[in-house]
Image (cartoon, coloured by chain):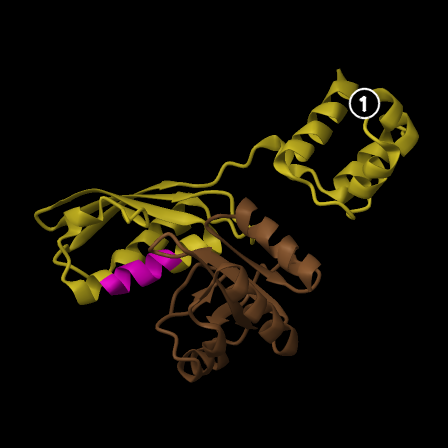
Chain colours: A brown, B yellow
Amino acid sequence: MTYLIERLLQIAAANPKGFTVTIPDCKPVRSGWAIGHKETQNSFGRQGLRKVVEHSLQTTGIVGGWKGYNGRYYFDTVIIEHDASKALDLKHEHGQSAIYHLDTGRIL
Amino acid sequence: MKNTLIKNEHLLNLPQGELETLRTRAELHRRYSSIEFKVISCKDDTLTLRVVQDKSHAGNYFDAKRLVEIAKETFGGLGDWKRINAGPIPYNPPAPDAVTPEWIQERMQLHGLKPKAVSDETGIDRNTITAYKNGLKPLSGVVRAFWYFYFKSKQA
């Protein structure tokens, strides 16, 4: 766990604008609709990342990070769904104001 | 904290609700695609923007045409502007970005090089050379540049 967290912090430092990876292999996620999981909202810093990693290992196996509007670096469990209709359902289920399609840059 | 999500955001004069919508969209573009926006001017009924894509961790790069569409989709339906002019700057990857473990393996094979030979020539530990070649050690920007120019020197 400690190694994985350190690796993710390295990835965050190298990608200050954002990243999305599968864990534990830390490979980039390159396609699909990205939906933030409702249970990891507002997670930031090392403690927030630990919580997200523990949650993600039990659920989707995908972790994302990004620099927010206020300059703070946030983390979350990410759900990737390739069907737009299902992605929209997940958007509502997880209370997200918007979701993002990695392949096209579309936002719903 | 000064907002850097959308440069010159203040020129838009958007009501708070629309501003939050715009910031949410912009934050998603930056997070997932390293796309950022700069407002150049907002006069009469025309909004002029610059849309730039930087290096994206997801590798999801868009051409100029799509970047213009993204800018219009992001700023569309907001404010009083009737026309959006977007100047796109697509990502132009530096040559060393092509370096991957597979790239290293191909070139070592092409030049008939074993890790020991590379180690002897460069002074880098043989195990480290092997780790980069096999994808066991991450390739930082500096390390990719090393490999790129190392093999480039073999072509001279």
Left/right placement of residue B147 relative to residue B41 reads right
- State whether residue B150 is above or below residue B78: above
Q: Main secondary structure of the magenta part?
A: helix
Asked whether residue B21 is drawn in magenta, I would say yes
The residue lying at 82 percent from left, 37 percent from top is: B128
Residue A25 place in picture, x, y as percent? 71, 60
The residue lying at 33 percent from left, 55 percent from top is: A70
Question: In this view of the protein, can residue A71 be seen by the observer?
Answer: yes
- State whether residue B55 is above or below residue B14: above
Residue B3 place in picture, x, y as percent? 28, 49
Q: Which residue carries the number 1 mark? A: B122
Residue A100 place in picture, x, y as percent? 44, 65
Amino acid type at circle 1 is Thr
The residue lying at 37 percent from left, 52 percent from top is: A71
Viewer-closest of B81 and A43:
A43
For mark 1, name the chain: B
Q: What's drawn in magenta, residue-wise?
A: B20-27
